[in-house]
């Protein structure tokens, strides 16, 4: 019998991106000690996520931005270029389109050099990693450079069936729990990414899964960041989306998930990548800008609720919740029936 991973398109790594050019770098707002501050975000071009090079997650197309020829010295050069953009930002967020603690992606001496550079100018550093690379030893080493460290783990869902049969995450909830405990015991803080609407789920199932997953990690994670799926090139999700068998979540669903989990304890945020576009979380396109702006303010702690946003398309979303429940299908009903 075929497995989910047999349907995942062949991954390809381009070697087009220059080895000493980062993929992207920008400034965004975030909250630090309840204060809204600027954060410098840098996406380093590495040799790629080790899991993506094997098979990878069904919604992830990051590998296409990586370059297998990137060496440690190139990562340091990329970081230096990114730091030229420093203009008083207090937080540094480092993404590698993989795992900052994976020594195949970021060698230990490079990791130390990057954190040491960062420690001189930022109050807090946040980086993302898969759970299998988290160890007390590696965290203590990072903390010796930057005491205010936040480790981000991409759990996506606390449901092991979804992790295996929808997301192809390559680890289980228990692996996340072990890594999360190690992070908390080290003295670092923990951010957890949860996916809204992995493939094959109805809109309602996706909402329920996100809320249930948040409930399962409410006691351990300091921050929960909900990532609504955005369609990325070369992925199984893209293939389903092009056939009308997948629609990114409605922004109403994102609002519902945020509202339902805001009192769980952890700080709850969402920065919908590609929001308001056809391949990202969207509603009717007329109200998307207003809702995204409300979600941003909510995530920064500038408003306590997003429930007061209105648009007629909310009725259509409610119809989808009803109809998909009836058909038990995740097919994009509007694409087929208008
Ligand atoms: S989502 Fe993260 S873990 Fe999964 S393939 Fe992409 S970079 Fe790797
Ligand atoms: Zn609308």
Image (tube, rainbow, N blue to C red):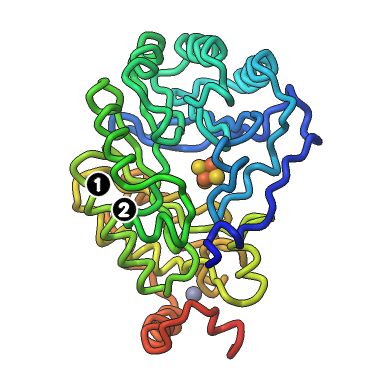
**Mark closest to the chain's N terminus, 2 or 1:** 2
| Residue 338: quadrant of the picture | bottom right
Q: Measured from the top left, where is residue 314 in percent x and y?
A: 41, 78
Name above or below for residue 92 compared with residue 7: above
> Quick check: 257 left or right of 250?
left
Q: What residue appears at the point 35 percent right and 51 percent down from the top-left corner?
A: 298
Q: Residue furthest front?
A: 1
**Residue toward you, 112 or 90:** 112
Q: Which residue is mark 2?
A: 158
Residue 217: mark in rendering: 1
Task: Determine the secondary structure under disc 2.
Answer: loop
Measure the C-alpha gap from mark 2 to mark 1.
8 Å
> Quick check: 65 left or right of 50?
right
> Quick check: 262 left or right of 101?
left
Q: What residue appears at the point 79 percent right and 34 percent down from the top-left corner?
A: 15
Q: Is mark 2 within 8 Å of ligand 1?
A: no
Residue 132: mark in rendering: none
Q: Measured from the top left, where is residue 194 in percent x and y?
A: 38, 51
From the image, state whether disc 2 or disc 1 is nearer to you: 2
Q: Measured from the top left, where is residue 251 in percent x and y?
A: 45, 66
| Residue 219: quadrant of the picture | top left
* Marks 2 & 1, CB-CB < 8 Å contact: yes
Task: Determine the secondary structure under disc 1.
Answer: loop
Q: What residue appears at the point 27 percent right and 20 percent down from the top-left corner?
A: 186
Q: Is mark 1 within 8 Å of ligand 1?
A: no
Name above or below for residue 291 compared with residue 27: below
> Quick check: 20 left or right of 101?
right
**Residue toward you, 35 or 127:** 127
């Amino acid at each position: 019998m075929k497995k989910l991973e047999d349907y995942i398109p062949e991954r390809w790594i381009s070697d087009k991106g220059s080895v000493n050019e980062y993929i992207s770098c920008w400034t965004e707002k975030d909250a630090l000690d309840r204060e809204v501050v600027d954060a410098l975000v840098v996406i380093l071009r590495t040799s790629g996520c080790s899991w993506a090079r094997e098979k990878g997650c069904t919604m992830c197309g990051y590998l296409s931005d990586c370059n297998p020829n990137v060496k440690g010295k190139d990562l340091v050069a990329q970081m230096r270029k990114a730091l030229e953009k420093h203009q008083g930002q207090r937080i540094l967020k480092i993404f590698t389109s993989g795992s900052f603690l994976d020594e195949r992606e970021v060698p230990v001496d490079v990791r130390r050099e990057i954190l040491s550079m960062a420690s001189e100018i930022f109050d807090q550093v946040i980086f993302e990693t898969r759970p299998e690379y988290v160890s007390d030893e590696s965290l203590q080493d990072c903390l010796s450079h930057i005491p205010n460290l936040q480790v981000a783990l991409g759990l996506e869902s606390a449901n092991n069936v979804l992790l295996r049969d929808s997301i192809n995450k390559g680890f289980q909830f228990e692996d996340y729990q072990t890594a999360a405990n190690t992070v908390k015991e080290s003295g670092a803080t923990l951010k957890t990414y949860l996916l809204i609407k992995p493939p094959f789920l109805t809109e309602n199932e996706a909402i329920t899964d996100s809320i249930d997953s948040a409930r399962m990690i409410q006691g351990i994670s300091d921050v929960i960041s909900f990532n609504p799926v955005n369609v990325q090139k070369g992925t199984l999700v893209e293939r389903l989306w092009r056939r009308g068998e997948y629609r990114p979540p409605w922004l109403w669903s994102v609002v519902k998930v945020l509202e339902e989990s805001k009192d769980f304890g952890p700080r709850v945020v969402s920065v919908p990548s590609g929001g308001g576009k056809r391949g990202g979380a969207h509603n009717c396109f007329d109200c998307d800008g207003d809702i995204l702006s409300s979600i941003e303010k909510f995530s920064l702690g500038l408003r306590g609720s997003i429930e007061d946003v209105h648009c007629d398309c909310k009725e259509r979303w409610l119809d989808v919740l009803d109809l998909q429940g009836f058909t038990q299908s995740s097919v994009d009903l509007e694409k087929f029936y208008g």
